[in-house]
Image (spheres, grey):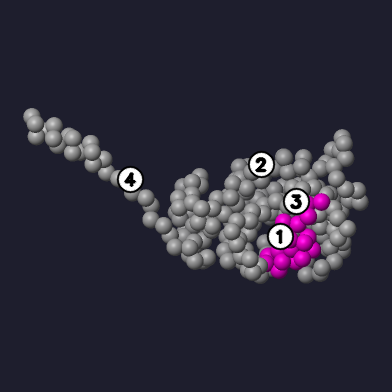
């Protein structure tokens, strides 16, 4: 189903765990809901969280995992269903968020309707950029199974591991590119980010609303200097003849 840079939603959270910018993409969300209904006939597809729900879930994960990125490995504090329980360092960059209001992960994170995954996490300056790519519902179920298994790590010859699962999701690469591009914008590392997008009148509004909502003034496009030397030499040659 997903191909290239297919993104369901994007959030930017500041160091106070507050969402300062968010954008949802209805076309991709419609594709996700249709695929979920096909995979789970008797279950209604979960809706994307509100900004407040997302901020609360992110703050809860920070408390549970010890930091915004987390441990990346199963430790004594790890609980079943958490990212560190998967015991893979990639979970420091591709995270999951529990949307349940209950802090008991074991009773709530065995249901894919309570989980938002995979979320690409990129931290730059004082901001956390979270990008949710479009994936297959089956891949979500595979992750839920991985996060609730009793053993840890990737066994030799194992058919299913988190790394192999992510390797088959092409939209993950696009989500990383988007996250890093937005990170450069919010940190001011680039004045003219090179982002390849489809021609659409709404693209400009996306970046304008992003910079405006978090207090970044737009920078003027650099103007190339006129070739003064070439013009003067041409004038002198004309005057000579």
- Residue indicated by mark 4: 224
Camera-side residue of 218 and 108: 218
- Quadrant holding the N terminus: top right
Q: Position of residue 59 (x, y in %)?
A: 72, 66
Q: Are marks 1 and 2 in contact (CB under 8 Å)?
A: no
In this orientation, does residue 180 appear? yes
The secondary structure type at the circle numbered 1 is: loop
Find the residue positioned furthest to the top.
241
Q: Which mark is residue 170?
A: 2
The secondary structure type at the circle numbered 2 is: loop
The reply to whether the magenta stretch includes residue 56 is yes
The secondary structure type at the circle numbered 4 is: loop
Q: Quadrant of residue 96?
A: bottom right
Q: Disc 3 or disc 4, which is closer to the eye?
A: 4
* Picture residue at 82% right of the left edge, 60% below the top: 109
- Residue indicated by mark 1: 68
What separation in Å lies between label 1 and label 2 (alpha carbons)? 25 Å
């Amino acid at each position: 189903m997903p191909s290239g840079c297919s993104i369901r939603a994007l959030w930017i959270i500041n160091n106070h765990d507050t969402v300062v910018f968010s954008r949802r993409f209805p076309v991709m969300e419609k594709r996700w809901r249709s695929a979920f209904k096909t995979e789970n006939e008797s279950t209604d597809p979960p809706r994307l969280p509100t900004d407040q729900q997302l901020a609360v879930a992110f703050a809860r994960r920070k408390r549970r995992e010890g930091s915004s990125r987390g441990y990346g490995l199963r430790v004594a504090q790890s609980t079943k269903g958490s990212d560190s329980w998967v015991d893979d360092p990639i979970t420091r960059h591709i995270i999951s968020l529990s949307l349940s209001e209950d802090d008991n992960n074991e009773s709530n994170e065995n249901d894919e309707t309570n989980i938002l995954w995979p979320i690409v996490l990129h931290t730059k300056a004082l901001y956390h950029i979270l990008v949710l790519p479009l994936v297959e519902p089956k891949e979500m179920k595979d992750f839920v199974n991985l996060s609730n298994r009793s053993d840890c790590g990737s066994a030799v010859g194992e058919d299913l591991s988190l790394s192999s699962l992510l390797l088959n999701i092409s939209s993950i690469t696009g989500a990383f590119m988007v996250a890093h591009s937005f990170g450069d914008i919010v940190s001011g590392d680039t004045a003219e980010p090179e982002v390849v997008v489809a021609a659409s009148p709404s693209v400009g509004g996306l970046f304008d609303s992003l910079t405006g909502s978090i207090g970044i003034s737009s920078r003027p496009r650099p103007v190339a200097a006129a070739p003064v030397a070439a013009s003067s030499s041409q004038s002198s040659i004309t005057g000579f003849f």
